Amino acid sequence: MTESTSALGKDLIGLEPLSKEQILTVMDTAELFKDVSERRIKKVPVLRGKTIVNLFFEASTRTRVSFEFAQKRLSADTVNVAAAGSSVAKGETLVDTARNLEAMRIDMVVMRHPASGAAKFLADRIPSNVINAGDGRHEHPTQGLLDMLTMRDHLGRIEGLKVCVVGDVLHSRVARSNFFGLLKLGAEVAVCGPKTLIPMRIEEMGVKVFPRVEEALEWADVINVLRLQLERMKGGFIPSLREYNRFFGVTRERLDAAGRDILILHPGPMNRGVEIDSDVADGPNQVILKQVTNGVAIRMAVLYLLAGGSPEKAHTVNEVAEA
Ligand code: CP
């Protein structure tokens, strides 16, 4: 594989391998790209001539559409491939699929896959840049980045923030990307959820564990609420959804009892009335749709940097055109 000269290396597989400086570079570059989505003509010629394939082997609304908007706003040519309807459904392997796409001269692959490690596996075998759009329980790096950008937008910093991830941490790639990113940027990180849904020995990562959601809310400046990822559960991890809501649901009563403002994030999709009640999901402290808006800017920044764009030149999108 050829050595990459991009600020992020050849691929974006996770936040675990990135340095604090690389994470901040993506977030700072995203700040500069936010403006493009607010213009009447939402397009700059930064990735003109680049061809990107979005390879989605799992359901997605936010990540897939957000990557596609980011690519189109940077003027790349994009093709979407879903597992259903592709030759994967006929038994073709992941690498053969990617090699066939590369034979048509592509530059980047954005992939979501149900298997942990699938993005790295592919990245090690093809010369195109690979961006992990979520692989099994491993990582969802652009979600971690957009979560941190949203926290920084609203609270002015990441360092020293107390962030608690509440819910099904065991099956969550979003949680893992949050831990790696937040700890590198100096936040304090905690989790809260049923014992069966908290990974064993998570404390060894430097993460606190709150067994009761009331204690977590007393401690946290920010909570990132996760859904129960039922599609990844093989067996009964919780007695019932109603019981989960009763003991761990983020409700207006529990937030009021905490007695102070707590920023509420949720990566989506939400299950209202299970992990989060509607009056919290639509309430004054939530920034859930702001996360979605920031997702486009983060993905534009990742695409730009992986394509070899210079962080120093990103300060005006017109200069970005020459990168
Ligand atoms: N947050 C997230 O990954 O949402 P999607 O599954 O809709 O992409």
Image: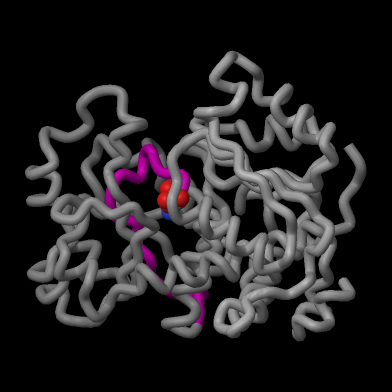
Query: Is 317 positioned to the left or the right of 297 in the image?
Result: right
Residue 119 can be seen in this image: yes
Residue displayed at 23% across by 51% down = 271
Residue displayed at 62% across by 71% down = 27
Q: Residue 28 in magenta?
A: no
Q: Which residues are magenta?
A: 157-175
In this rendered view, identify the residue nearer to me: 85 or 63: 85
The furthest residue to the right: 2
Q: Quadrant of the N terminus?
A: top right
Q: Quadrant of residue 207?
A: bottom left
The picture places residue 246, in percent across and down from the top left corner, at 7, 51
Query: Is 80 positioned to the left or the right of 63 in the image?
Result: right
The picture places residue 277, in percent across and down from the top left corner, at 15, 61
Residue displayed at 41% across by 43% down = 172
Q: Quadrant of residue 184?
A: bottom right
Q: Is residue 167 above or below residue 322?
A: above
Q: How is the image coloured?
A: one colour
Number of numbered discs present?
Answer: 0
Q: Quadrant of the C terminus?
A: bottom right
